[in-house]
Amino acid sequence: MNFKKPMTLFAAAAVTLSASLAFAWEPSGKVDCIAPAGPGGGWDFTCRSVGNTLETLKLVPGAVQTTNMAGAGGGVAFAHVISKRNDDTNLLVAASTATTTRLAQRQFAGMDASMVKWVGALGADYGVIAVGKNSTYTDLNQLMAALKKDPRAVKFAGGSANGGWDHLKVLIAAKAAGVGSLPSVPYLSYNNGGEALTQVIGGHVDAFTGDISEAAGFWESGDLRVIAVLSETRLPGKFSSIPTAREQGIDALGPNWRGFYMPKDTAADVQDYWVNAIETLYASPEWKAVMVKNGLIPFHPKANEFEAFVNKQVADIEQLSIEIGLLK
């Protein structure tokens, strides 16, 4: 798989439907958004930020409650939805490239992407590699030089499971830098990006691998030094001072879409409602402000194309995992 041009996976498209359209079904009462990890990570960010915006725009009749359900890199939540809430109409589940990665690597035993409905995506979050403010590593080349000398020299912390998207991002960068013995590079898996960041900031782990939305707060406070963003060009706005891996001579890219799936055994008009709600939200000034604040780039496949996009990404990441040695 060629990750040098990942935006072929992330071709931006936006379709805005009127929020005033009448639907055969509308939610009543509280809406539940499952974040398949603990508080503080990317899925938690997706549920809370989208939930707040849905409420602000009055696209839901009541509150959107975030339920954190950590375990198995999203597998616990995936199994919970399929086995216990497969017809729940008031349920959304945060998803991302981390979700398709686990599906691609067959980590959700007995389950696959066809067992849920894919609602849509609301932007993409680029990967970063970061270190604590007192780290001896000041740029990506220094860190990769240490790995070239000894693949075990730098320990990385991330919020995905071993072999998950956060882990893959480091290996993509290391492979591009010419590091050998990629399976030997240490990666420590935590329940979410927030926990992983705490370990790095506390000096217990050498480096963080995650997304810019996860790292933004600690970077702004000065507790974290982001030494590379895995994007084609520098991110806009306040993140424009962060160098890309590419400009440091390492051709590594790691975009992470953010969106939702929902239970499979729900009626078509239920899915229509949530697809429209997400598309209306995406087009709103309120959501655009959230995107700018958190470094999200535009990414919104057409509603009728999102499932095909997910299936293609699963196949592509499966091939990448084979190339890097994570799958046979």
Image (cartoon, helix red, strand yellow):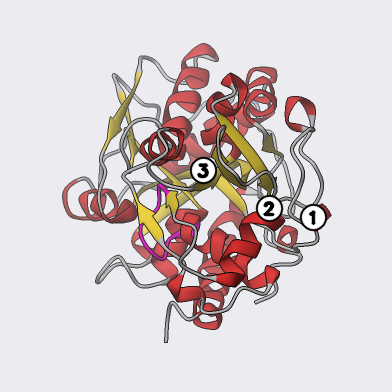
Residue 309 at x, y percent in the picture: 59, 61
Please indicate whether residue 321 sits to the left or right of residue 114 in the image.
Answer: right
Residue displayed at 57% across by 66% down = 147
Asked if one can make out residue 24 in the rendered structure from this viewpoint, the answer is no
Residue displayed at 36% across by 46% down = 267
Dot 1 falls on a residue whose secondary structure is helix
**Which quarter of the rendered picture does the N terminus lie within?**
bottom right
Along the viewing direction, whichever of 30 and 35 lies nearer the viewer = 35
In this figure, which residue is indicated by the disc labeled 1?
A: 248
Q: Amino acid at mark 1?
A: Gln
Chain-order first, disc 1 or disc 2: 2
Residue 265 at x, y percent in the picture: 29, 52
Residue 259 in the magenta stretch? The answer is no
Dot 3 falls on a residue whose secondary structure is strand
Residue 164 in the magenta stretch? The answer is yes
Asked if one can make out residue 164 in the rendered structure from this viewpoint, the answer is yes
In terms of image quadrants, where is residue 34?
Answer: top left
Q: Read off the magenta span.
A: 158-165
Please indicate whether residue 70 sits to the left or right of residue 181 in the image.
Answer: left
Mark whose residue sits in front, 2 or 3: 2
Residue 26 at x, y percent in the picture: 40, 27
Q: Amino acid at mark 2?
A: Leu
Extreme residue in the bottom direction: 328
In this figure, which residue is indicated by the disc labeled 2?
A: 140
Residue displayed at 44% across by 73% down = 184
Q: Amino acid at mark 3?
A: Gly
